[in-house]
Amino acid sequence: MNTMKVLALTLLITLMHSPLFLSVTVSSSKPKVEVHEHTDAVLACEFRTEKDQNPRIEWKKKGMGVTFVYFNHKFTGQYASRAKMEGATLTFHSVSQKDSGEYRCEVTASEDHVSLGEATVTLNVLVPPHVPSCEVPSSVFVGSGLELQCKDKLSVPPATYRWYKDNKALTPSAETQYSADTSKGTLEFRSVTKIDAGMYRCESSNSVGAPKSCVAQQLKVIDYPLNTTVLIAGAATFLALVLFCCICVCVCRRRGCCKKEKKMKSNKSYNPPPPPPIRNIKHYKQAHSFMI
């Protein structure tokens, strides 16, 4: 029994002095951080070393490449005036959408058996709706198709959209002549009528802030000009006549009408003029004499 206790104690002492316990460990109590725009963001990073009491701490932002945020005991570039460090925890002041991304906390303890440890923190900056850009034409012809467009490129999460006509929300249904896409911000008319004229505006919204709307714009629905209508009708009639003539010519050629007419003209008999009258030699008398 005493032998077993001695072996167990020996094994415990061996494990305690094993290199497994001589390593730096790094973690984050909040690996995902979501904050509103223009507020502070705290990126937590905790570490523990076995021997090294003055480890090297670095923060990097991952993207197309790797950008140093905190290096060699100081902040770099734009971060110098709006960030602070407490232990290994990083705090940004007045964040914007550009600060969103994945950050890595790295702790290097050269005296530990495993000298490098790291933890990743993802920052997502939430942005309320902005005033959307709205595309509404000033006029459109009756019967033509039409698509109105609305876009807010800045809001996070992405905005959803709603269209209004004369300050009344448009709700598409099977009976309406228009359809709307709330995620793309489009309002589409299959065939515009006179009753579609009015003041149109679009509203963008998300879960972060109050909805924002663009300025209402006037849409006029007009008839085609009379001269344009006459021109179109005349052109259509002319084309129909040309097509009819081409069909008639083709039918005539297939039936051989043109060839028969030519043949009849070529086979027409030719009557030469009558020959002059022939005098009878027997009744011819010499009336004069000739001298040689």
Image (cartoon, grey):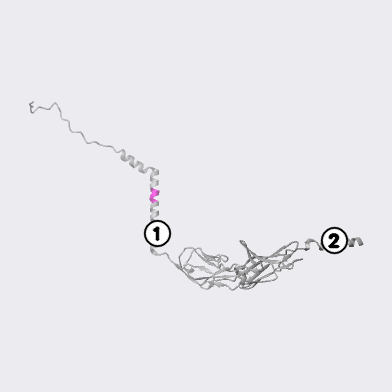
Residue 156's image quarter? bottom right
Q: Is residue 197 left or right of residue 162?
A: left
Q: In the image shown, does 40 or 72 lie closer to the viewer?
A: 72
* Tag 1 secondary structure: helix
Question: Residue at horizontal 85%, vertical 61%?
Answer: 11
Q: Amino acid at mark 1?
A: Ala
Magenta stretch, main secondary structure class: helix
Q: Tell me: residue 240, above or below residue 36.
A: above
Q: Is residue 60 left or right of residue 148?
A: right
Magenta stretch, residue numbers: 244-248
| Residue 233 marker | 1
Count of marks placed on residues = 2
Q: In the image shown, does 270 or 202 lie closer to the viewer?
A: 202
| Residue 11 marker | 2
Sooner in the amino-acid sequence: mark 2 or mark 1: 2
Q: Amino acid at mark 2?
A: Leu
Local packing at callout 1 (Cα closer than 10 Å; few below 14, some 14-19, many 20+) is few
Question: Residue at horizontal 35%, vertical 41%?
Answer: 260
Q: In the image shown, does 166 or 55 lie closer to the viewer?
A: 55
Q: Is residue 187 left or right of residue 268?
A: right
Q: Tell me: residue 61, above or below residue 242.
A: below
Local packing at callout 2 (Cα closer than 10 Å; few below 14, some 14-19, many 20+) is few
Q: Tell me: residue 252, above or below residue 275.
A: below
Q: Position of residue 173 (x, y in %)?
A: 56, 66
The alpha-carbon separation of the residues under discs 2 and 1 comes to 103 Å
Q: Position of residue 103 (x, y in %)?
A: 65, 65
Residue 109's image quarter? bottom right
Q: In the image shown, does 10 or 122 lie closer to the viewer?
A: 10
Q: Quadrant of the C terminus?
A: top left
Residue 3's image quarter? bottom right
- Mark whose residue sits in front, 2 or 1: 2
Q: Position of residue 179 (x, y in %)?
A: 54, 65
